[in-house]
Image (tube, rainbow, N blue to C red):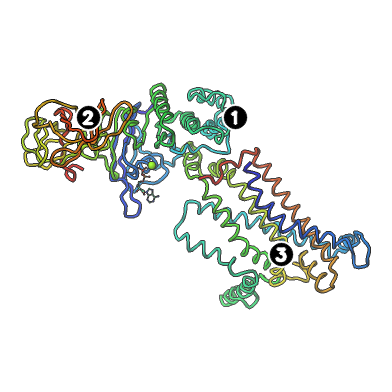
Amino acid sequence: MRVVALLVPSVAYLLAMFVFPFAYGVLLSLRPKGGGVSLANYVAFFLDPWQARTIWVTASIAVPNTLLTVLLALIVAYAMRRGIWLERTITTALVLPIALGTVLVAEGINGFYGPKGWLTQVLLALGLAEPTRLTHNYTGVMLALFLQHFPFCFLMLLGYISGIDPALEASARVLGAGPWAVFRRVMWPLIAPGVAIAGALVFVMNFGVFPSAVLVGQPAGATRTIAIAAYQEAFEHYDMPMASAIAVVMGVCQLAGLAVILFLRRRMAGTGVATMGAGKR
Amino acid sequence: MITSLAFRLTKRFGAKVVLDDLTLEVRGREFVTVLGPSGCGKSTALNLLAGLIPPTRGEIRLDGVRIDGLPPERRGFGMVFQNYALFPHLTVGANVAFGLVLRSRGKAEIAERVRRMLELVRLTGFADRYPGQLSGGQQQRVAIARALAVEPRVLLLDEPLSNLDTKLRLEMRGEIKRLHADLGLTSIYVTHDQAEALSLSDRVVVLCDGRVIQAGTPAEIHDRPQTVFVADFMGYRNFFPLTVASEEGDTVLARGEALALRGRTVVPLRPGDAAVAAVRPEDVETTTEPPGPNVVRGTVRLTEYLGREHGVEVALEGGPTLTVSLAHPVAVGSALALRLPPERVVILPAEGDAR
Ligand SMILES: Nc1ncnc2c1ncn2[C@@H]1O[C@H](COP(=O)(O)OP(=O)(O)O)[C@@H](O)[C@H]1O
Ligand SMILES: [Mg+2]
């Protein structure tokens, strides 16, 4: 039952954010500009390497970024589960990027990591070799996405982890479990559902990356994501049906990602009862 | 089997001293209860012994060997928590097997031991259930089986019965006592319930604000409390501030404005000392004797039906209120003559001296 309850947020999210717009978009995408009802838009998308490769480009940003974000958020949240010194200050600092919004963060990244940014200036002043370029490429987008999604993911996991009764860890320790065994045998099974959901949400957000890919990426090349392709069809070529077809492809990719995550989660948990009691206190 | 667990522990949280040089030696096979009100540092003491939090100062010796530097997983203790703390994602069997798996015991040995442990706590056939599918009492029994499965050198129990209802609590109390005796365990049990402390223990240690204020056998603590605090904890409901008038051996006569009482002393008192006389409601009896020391008169102000007896609040002539417990009902407003038997009255030093 708890598994179902845990799925409710993502299901609601899917319904509101995907299913309805999806249905509309699907219908639109099946009526290509040339007239009639056909799969012509999809055929055109997959046959044009310039378009089709956006799937690969987006995935090569979204997948590693999701793994990185969730892993780091998990490590930090786990380390903070008993509360730490200056916890409030640190949490606030971590959460600030959410409040700032995508564009400001991108501006900040340009200002700090950019070719004329502080980091470069300092490195040059110190006489270090010209640093590798960190913005307007793949790295820039990775940085921006990480900064935006880490706080959200961290907060979600911290809430999840600190909801686990500390006596569970204590009893595992007394029974002979060292810190790693505590994590592997007790904490991880209880945290995994939270990690799966955080991962699913971060992945979906990452896969739809648009402003960051434009502002700190290389929108004409290395970071031409699928969202950019859709945008160009809609607002540069004024081909709404084609844009819809691309959006549908993007949605299908996102659903596939979610399916993979939930499948892995189920495999790891072993049994359906595994999530019982997580966050119970 | 251990011979002794001796410790001396101080714990501060910031400026707050939670345990002030708590010193105790527990012998092998002994059942020691730490009794004290909520917040007096009982859980902190057990957590220090288990190694879950570091002491500010002090040492722990198991059979003479210092173990306070060891992490919890290497102390070989067992611990039972108030809220059971069963692993919700593991079956009952896997919970009980947890410590054995970590000790890399063989599959067959683990299976056999889990079966034996569940039999011991009368949960045969529950191995495949999940904790969430058990009642509170069953969960606590699983927790006990899980702690006992690894043959702990010392068993620590932190208010294990306080989440259970009264009937179950009595039943589980018996079970814990039986297991302790049958398995030859060395147990330290923490509680705020005097009945648990008295019925289970070889020795009771009364803790108040992180300090031991009295230690002894249950009978000693019950019959010979040394302070008002301990007496209060042990069910003495009536306390009268008096002044010692005369002493002979271990009985003294103490007087106040409304009352003169002869009683036993546990801590020596001299004439002129400020004292408090303590009496249990059930030790007071009705009498036909004329007024004098230990015989008082008063008016019934309130009665309470308690099943086997009647709780009666009596306003004594001269002001103070006496709570007594009588076998027969009395009417509110009626006059009563009551006797407080001198051997049942304990005269204690006034608070602030011995605490
Ligand atoms: N981690 C902690 N930080 C600060 N104070 C604590 C901490 N743990 C316990 N205390 C304080 O120590 C005192 C004793 O707590 P505890 O040992 O839990 O008492 P008990 O188990 O007897 O009810 C309490 O006043 C509690 O507020
Ligand atoms: Mg406690």
Residue under label 1, please give it: B128
Identify whether B92 is placed above or below A136: above
- As measured in the structure, the alpha-carbon distance from the residue carrying label 2 to the one carrying label 1 is 48 Å
Which of the two labelled residues, at mark 2 and mark 1, occupies the earlier sequence position?
A: 1
Q: Which disc, if any, is residue A209?
A: 3
Q: Amino acid at mark 1?
A: Asp
Chain under callout 3? A
Dot 3 crowding, Cα within 10 Å, few <14, some 14–19, many 20+: many
**Residue B134, x across and y down, in percent:** 54, 32
Residue under label 2, please give it: B223
Residues marked 3 and 1, same chain: no
What residue do we see at 55% from left, 24% from top? B109
Residue B30 seen:
no
Chain under callout 2? B
Dot 1 crowding, Cα within 10 Å, few <14, some 14–19, many 20+: few
Q: Amino acid at mark 2?
A: Asp
Residue A91 seen:
yes
